[in-house]
Image (tube, helix red, strand yellow):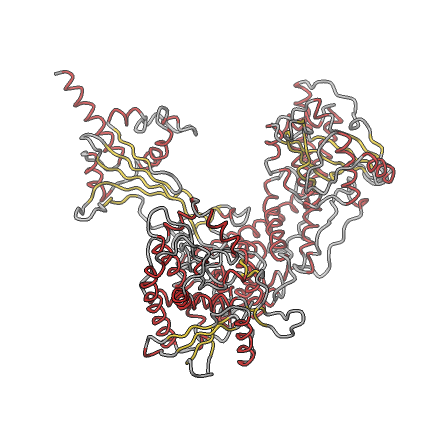
């Protein structure tokens, strides 16, 4: 969407003549008021505005014109608009009752002079880069229905026709306001629009009504709605009389016209970068210093696309907005800036760039050529692949948590120093899939059905396969132990898991058992079983590398909200059935008063969350029809009619059984059988830890520890660097798992803000200390743009309204402030000062306290033993008692007041 370069002046003139023939009369603005800029002309051009003397053919793009002369012309235009607006209300008298009538020529002339600049900007925005059919040259579109979104006041895509004929009074003729004069209100709308007061954050729309009379009438009929009243009120702040502010708004609008991508950068940065730049692309390069041309173009393309649908808000004026944040967060390295910018162009935000580098190294080494990639053709590949890299790190970091079975050799996954074998560390040869016969318990490594990761991230596919083989090996070892224990003791696997793992098996109703089937078909034998135990979910999640084992599915099953159906495949080469697919079922509602099936398919996923293949989806559709389950929408499983079901069953030679293969049910376990099973399980597990496997396991732990420590150090160093370069909130500690799962707590620069401080009066004319303030951070996080945000609690201790009272003013981020007044008796009743009322995880000491006051009292309780030091006198001004801590002072206050009342009662 950058400005066309190389259009001859004569061609642009011809285009302007064409616009005049199309009825777009306002194609230029001429300013005469200021002697310094007398005769200056602002003319609509292709995605820009040309400026120059009115009586000369020497015009140039606005950003190349002398700043003083252009600003002088705009100041004169500001004065002209205000002068025309001053005389307009009197001319509008008597026109309120004729909204569609032609206004007098004098009114139309004043409106045209007031709105000329806005009309020119709208016309320049309608330039069409691509040649149209039958017209080999680019130019302004003649189709009024063409949708554009370029200028800051465009609230999303708008039709080109919305910017035509702005000087027509009927385009601004709204209904009578409920309170006020119609002419004054209408002039206010027009003037604010003429002065571009709807540019930038926090502004209110002041645009015209529709270009068509029918739509205008509909808008007028809806003019009494709350929205229109709100807009009228938001515009009642008046007209901006500051010419400097008007100049700034015009320059911002011209910048957006030059390249809409500039709207995603800070306003002040844009105004500085655009001045003197020959094109929007040149200005964009200035805003992204050190970034290669390919990523600059790619980010520009992305930001223009976001602009088309992102509304009319400009970038954050207070700091660096989305466009330049990747450059600022990446630091001074040009290579890193280019890589992070290319990633942002593919919707990978800076926090994901940082997390990915912590997991596997610099992006430009992890994905060679990234820093030189250009626009188009990726379709979010970068962000998806980098998410797989982070998931791979998290899975590897979690391996040491399960040390019942020794880890195998990690050399295919991690280097000797603990780097993931990706990018620069990727092996020259890809890892070959093992033959099912080479695995001790059959083929349990799930098939991969995803993109060719190695083409973008060398070694990624190989590393994922290596992790799957590691998980398969450990799962086979566990399966052998379980099988031998069950065989020796006669216990079922459910009973064994419950006895040794401490978790109860899922309850299954007759309706649940009706979901289970056995299927023999031309491919293999399938067993569709409801998950019996949480361990089933864990083992399937490991085997298939998806989240069923840790995504809250066990809790959903226990609550009755979901059912997990396991699809186990037993091929001719398999000694044991292996997990193939996992199906989540969710509760169905009722529709039109008719009962719907109890369950519907929410999702069906295979290895690494792959969707079912064609035949698999057909078999699942047959199963859903057979057991009365709704196949759902967006699951890849289509409902089958009876004829289609018969045809598919014949094609696949599918034969259904009535339920899963049931072995002889063992007798109810005795305590001795359970104890024997536990002993035997421990013995068989211990037998896996030979000297050789123990050494291999320790070496694997060393490599994983190196991977995790390196990631933690990288995140810590980078967040500290961001703090040193201006993000003052990045202090204290932060949960690194929010950035990269598996990294834990990160210790940042010290938080030097005091926990306790004197509370000063904020009222004019009454300075001095009025109490004690305590502040505590409750949460620190970082946004996708790597900007810190925190939640804080504040508690003010002040004297109460009545003598002998203490007031607690509590506020927290996102919560309504609460003010509580306590007497000695009521404070004692809370148990706050009682050392015997220890927290038991349920705030037992706050029993009887209103819920809205608990948070404030909890904060106060955490401060009771903090040394007051130099703030002792400040606290004493509230409690009227001495003491080195709040516990001392509040305790004395409570006892003295209680003692005084006791003495008075005795008298």
Q: In the figure, 834 relative to 651: above or below?
A: above
Q: Nearer the viewer, residue 52 or 695?
A: 52
**Splitting the image into 4 quarters, where does residue 887 fall?**
top left
Q: Nearer the viewer, residue 892 or 662?
A: 662
Whether residue 633 is visible, yes or no, is yes
Q: Residue at x 30, y 41 (%)?
A: 774
Could you tell me residue 672's position as x and y percent?
67, 19
Q: Nearer the viewer, residue 97 or 766?
A: 97
**Splitting the image into 4 quarters, where does residue 353 fall?**
bottom right
Tally of marks: 0
Q: Residue at x 73, y 54 (%)?
A: 431
Could you tell me residue 565's position as x and y percent?
70, 33
Left or right of residue 657, residue 771 in this image: left
Q: In the figure, 395 relative to 196: above or below?
A: above
Q: In the figure, 703 relative to 542: above or below?
A: below
Q: Residue at x 65, y 19 (%)?
A: 671
Q: Residue at x 54, y 81 (%)?
A: 10
Could you tell me residue 752's position as x and y percent?
33, 50
Left or right of residue 437, residue 81 in this image: left
Could you tell me residue 547's position as x and y percent?
63, 41
């Amino acid at each position: 969407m950058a400005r066309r370069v190389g259009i001859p002046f004569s061609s642009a003139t011809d285009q302007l003549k064409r616009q005049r023939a199309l009825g777009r009369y306002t194609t230029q603005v001429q300013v005469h008021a200021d002697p310094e800029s007398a005769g200056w002309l602002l003319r609509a051009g292709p995605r820009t505005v040309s400026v120059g003397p009115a009586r000369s053919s020497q015009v140039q793009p606005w950003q190349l014109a002398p700043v003083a002369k252009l600003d002088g012309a705009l100041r004169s235009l500001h004065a002209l608009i205000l002068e025309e607006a001053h005389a307009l209300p009197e001319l509008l008298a008597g026109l309120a009752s004729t909204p569609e009538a032609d206004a007098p020529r004098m009114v139309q002339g004043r409106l045209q002079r007031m709105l000329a600049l806005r009309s020119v900007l709208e016309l320049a925005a309608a330039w069409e880069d691509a040649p149209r059919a039958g017209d080999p040259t680019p130019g302004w579109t003649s189709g009024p229905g063409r949708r554009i979104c370029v200028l800051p006041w465009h609230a999303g895509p708008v039709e080109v026709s919305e910017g035509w004929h702005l000087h027509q009074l009927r385009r601004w003729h709204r209904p009578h306001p409920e309170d006020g004069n119609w002419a004054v209100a209408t002039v206010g709308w027009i003037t604010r629009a003429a002065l571009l007061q709807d540019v930038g954050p926090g502004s209110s729309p002041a645009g015209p009504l529709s270009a068509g009379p029918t739509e205008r009438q509909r808008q007028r009929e809806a003019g009494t709605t709350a929205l229109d009243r709100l807009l009228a009120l938001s515009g009642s702040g008046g007209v901006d009389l500051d010419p400097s502010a008007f100049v700034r708004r015009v320059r911002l609008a011209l910048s957006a016209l030059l390249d809409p991508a500039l709207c995603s950068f800070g306003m002040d940065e844009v105004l500085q970068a655009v001045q003197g730049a020959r094109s929007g692309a040149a200005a964009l390069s200035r805003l992204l210093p050190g970034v290669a041309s390919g990523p600059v173009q790619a980010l520009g393309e992305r930001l223009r696309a976001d602009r088309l649908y992102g509304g009319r808000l400009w970038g954050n004026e207070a700091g660096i907005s989305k466009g330049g944040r990747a450059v600022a967060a990446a630091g001074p390295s040009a290579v890193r800036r280019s890589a992070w910018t290319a990633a942002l162009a593919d919707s990978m935000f800076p926090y994901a760039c940082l997390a990915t580098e912590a997991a596997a190294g610099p992006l430009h080494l992890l994905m060679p050529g990234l820093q030189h990639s250009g626009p188009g053709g990726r379709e979010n590949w970068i962000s998806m692949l980098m998410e797989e890299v982070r998931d791979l790190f998290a899975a590897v970091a979690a391996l040491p948590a399960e040390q019942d079975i020794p880890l195998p050799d990690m050399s295919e996954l991690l280097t000797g120093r603990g780097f993931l074998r990706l990018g620069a560390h990727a092996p020259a040869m890809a890892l070959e899939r093992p033959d099912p016969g080479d695995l001790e318990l059959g083929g349990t490594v799930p098939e991969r059905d995803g993109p060719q990761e190695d083409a973008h991230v060398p070694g990624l596919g190989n590393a994922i396969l290596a992790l799957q083989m590691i998980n398969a090996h450990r799962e086979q070892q566990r399966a052998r132990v379980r099988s031998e224990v069950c065989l020796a003791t006669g216990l079922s696997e459910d009973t064994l898991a419950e006895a040794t793992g401490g978790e109860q098996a899922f309850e299954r109703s007759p309706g649940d058992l009706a979901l289970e089937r056995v299927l023999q078909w031309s491919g293999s034998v399938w067993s569709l079983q409801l998950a019996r135990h949480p361990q089933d979910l864990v083992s399937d999640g490991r085997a298939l590398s998806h989240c069923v084992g840790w995504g809250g599915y066990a809790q959903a099953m226990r609550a009755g909200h979901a059912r997990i159906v396991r699809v186990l495949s037993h091929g001719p080469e398999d000694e044991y059935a292996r997990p193939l697919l996992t199906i989540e079922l969710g509760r169905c509602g009722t529709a039109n008063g008719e009962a719907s099936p109890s369950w519907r398919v929410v999702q069906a996923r295979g290895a690494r969350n792959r969707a079912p293949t064609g035949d698999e989806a057909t078999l699942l559709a047959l199963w859903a029809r057979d057991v009365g389950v709704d196949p759902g929408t967006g699951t890849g499983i289509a409902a089958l009619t009876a004829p289609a079901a018969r045809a598919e069953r014949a094609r696949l030679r599918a034969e259904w059984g009535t339920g899963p293969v049931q072995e002889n049910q063992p007798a109810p376990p005795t305590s001795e059988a359970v104890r024997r099973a536990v002993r035997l399980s421990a013995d068989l597990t211990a037998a896996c830890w030979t000297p050789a496997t123990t050494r291999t396991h320790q070496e694997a732990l060393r490599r994983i520890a190196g991977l995790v420590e390196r990631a933690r150090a990288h995140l810590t160093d980078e967040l500290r660097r961001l703090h040193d370069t201006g993000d003052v909130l990045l202090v204290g500690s932060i949960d690194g798992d929010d950035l990269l799962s598996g990294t834990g707590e990160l210790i940042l620069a010290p938080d030097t803000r005091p926990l306790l401080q004197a509370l000063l009066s904020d009222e004019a004319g009454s300075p001095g200390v009025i109490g004690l303030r305590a502040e505590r951070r409750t949460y620190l996080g970082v946004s996708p743009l790597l900007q810190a945000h925190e939640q804080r609690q504040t508690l003010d201790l002040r004297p109460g309204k009545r003598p002998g009272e203490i007031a607690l003013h509590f506020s927290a981020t996102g919560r309504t402030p609460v003010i509580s007044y306590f007497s000695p008796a009521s404070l004692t009743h809370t148990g706050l000062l009682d050392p015997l009322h220890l927290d038991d995880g349920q705030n037992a000491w706050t029993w009887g306290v209103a819920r809205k006051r608990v948070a404030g009292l909890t904060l106060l309780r955490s401060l009771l033993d903090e040394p007051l030091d130099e703030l002792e006198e400040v606290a004493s001004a509230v409690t009227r008692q001495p003491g080195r801590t709040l516990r001392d002072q509040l305790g004395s206050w409570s006892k003295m007041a209680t003692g005084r009342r006791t003495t008075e009662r005795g008298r």
